[in-house]
Image (cartoon, rainbow, N blue to C red):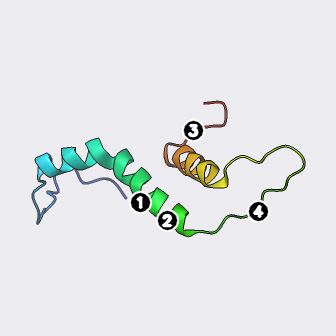
Amino acid sequence: MGCNKDKKVDRKFKTNWKIYNLAMKNEDEWFIQNAKKIIDRMPEPWEISKRGRPPHPPKSLVLALLLKSKHQKTYRG
């Protein structure tokens, strides 16, 4: 049940580091763009009433929660 350190890993594909670095650099921007497209298609979960405190914008809250969970942050920051 030990680990065989002499075993070689046969890789079929080479990593294109230029494309990989570009993807890592733009990952958050692409994530936000795609999330906004999906969120904009969804209907508002509630109607705004004339009384009481105005609600927070639900689409902005959903985007903020998606970013929070993607980056594994807590509510404190």
Position above or below: 13 against 52: below
Give the position of the C terminus as an image quadrant: top right
Image quadrant assignment for residue 53? top right
Which amino acid lies under the numbered mark 1 shown in the image of this protein? Asn
> Crowdedness of circle 4 by 10 Å Cα count: few (<14), some, many (20+)?
few
Instruction: Identify the residue position indicated by label 2 in the image.
Output: 38
- The Cα atoms of the two marked residues, 1 and 3, are separated by 20 Å
> Crowdedness of circle 3 by 10 Å Cα count: few (<14), some, many (20+)?
few
Task: Name the mark nearer the viewer: 1 or 3.
Answer: 1
Position above or below: 51 against 42: above
- The Cα atoms of the two marked residues, 4 and 3, are separated by 27 Å
Instruction: Identify the residue position indicated by label 3 in the image.
Output: 73
Image quadrant assignment for residue 39? bottom right
Q: Which element type, helix, strand or loop, lies under badge 3?
A: loop
Label number found at residue 46: 4
Give the position of the N terminus as an image quadrant: bottom left
Q: Position of residue 32 (x, y in %)?
A: 43, 51
Does 16 sit left or right of 35 as displayed?
A: left
Q: Position of residue 35 (x, y in %)?
A: 47, 58
Q: Are marks 2 and 3 in contact (CB under 8 Å)?
A: no
Label number found at residue 34: 1
Of callouts 1 and 4, the N-terminal one:
1
Nearest the viewer among 43 and 7 is: 43
Of callouts 2 and 4, the N-terminal one:
2
- The Cα atoms of the two marked residues, 2 and 4, are separated by 18 Å
- The Cα atoms of the two marked residues, 1 and 2, are separated by 6 Å
Which amino acid lies under the numbered mark 2 shown in the image of this protein? Ile
Report the residue at 25% width, 50% height from top: 23
Image quadrant assignment for residue 68? top right
Q: Are marks 1 and 2 in contact (CB under 8 Å)?
A: yes
> Crowdedness of circle 1 by 10 Å Cα count: few (<14), some, many (20+)?
few
Report the residue at 53% width, 63% height from top: 40
